[in-house]
């Protein structure tokens, strides 16, 4: 007794279907499109926040303010006088820190100087206990003063 697999006449009734069924893909894409259309307007709404306005007011230079300059080589100047190092700056700032009212320190850093040199001046101010430290910059071109 022999067993027969498949049609005896060689017909192609039960051949494999090798095409992709795109109906589930289209269904999923339509659902995703609907979800995105619903959620996008929610995402675009923002919380109302009042942002600060930029205002650069020139500082009023007072005679008691201390002007520290750092040139491109990293040398520190107290007014027009060159200091030996950051420790000399610290010693002078300790004397100024105990005054009442405490003077403000304005640091002018050269554009070409390394951040480290300006950082040493800021660190000396911090160690000495100076409460108000500011940076003096040049306004951008075309800005009225």
Image (spheres, rainbow, N blue to C red):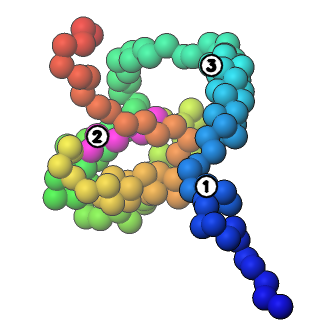
> Relative to residue 3, is residue 123 drawn left or right?
left
In the rendered view, would you say 30 is above or below 113?
above
Residue 108's label in the rendered image is 2
| Label 1 SS | loop
Measure how far apart labels 1 and 2 are at the Cα level.
Answer: 79 Å
Task: Please give the residue where the numbered disc 1 appears in the rendered image.
Answer: 17
Quick one: quadrant of the N terminus?
Answer: bottom right
From which residue to which does the magenta span run? 104-109
Q: Earlier in the sequence, mark 1 or mark 2?
A: 1
| Residue 41 on image: x %, y % | 66, 16
Q: Is residue 3 left or right of residue 87?
A: right
Nearest the camera: 57 or 142?
Answer: 142
Mark nearer the viewer, 1 or 2: 1
Q: Nearer the viewer, residue 87 or 38?
A: 38
* Residue 105 is a magenta residue: yes
The mark that comes first in sequence, 1 or 3, is 1
Give the residue at mark 3: 44
- Label 1 neighbour load within 10 Å: few <14, some 14-19, many 20+: few
């Amino acid at each position: 007794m022999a067993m027969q697999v498949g049609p005896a006449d060689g017909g192609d009734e039960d051949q494999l279907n090798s095409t992709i069924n795109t109906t589930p893909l289209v269904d999923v894409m339509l659902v995703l499109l609907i979800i995105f259309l619903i959620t996008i307007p929610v995402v675009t709404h923002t919380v109302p926040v009042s942002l600060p306005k930029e205002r650069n007011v020139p500082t009023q230079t007072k005679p008691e303010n201390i002007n520290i300059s750092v040139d491109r080589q990293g040398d520190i100047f107290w007014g027009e006088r060159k200091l030996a190092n950051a420790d000399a700056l610290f010693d002078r700032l300790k004397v100024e820190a105990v005054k009442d009212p405490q003077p403000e320190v304005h640091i002018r850093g050269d554009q070409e100087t390394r951040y480290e040199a300006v950082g040493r001046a800021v660190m000396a101010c911090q160690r000495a206990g100076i409460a108000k430290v500011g940076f003096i910059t040049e306004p951008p071109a075309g800005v009225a003063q």
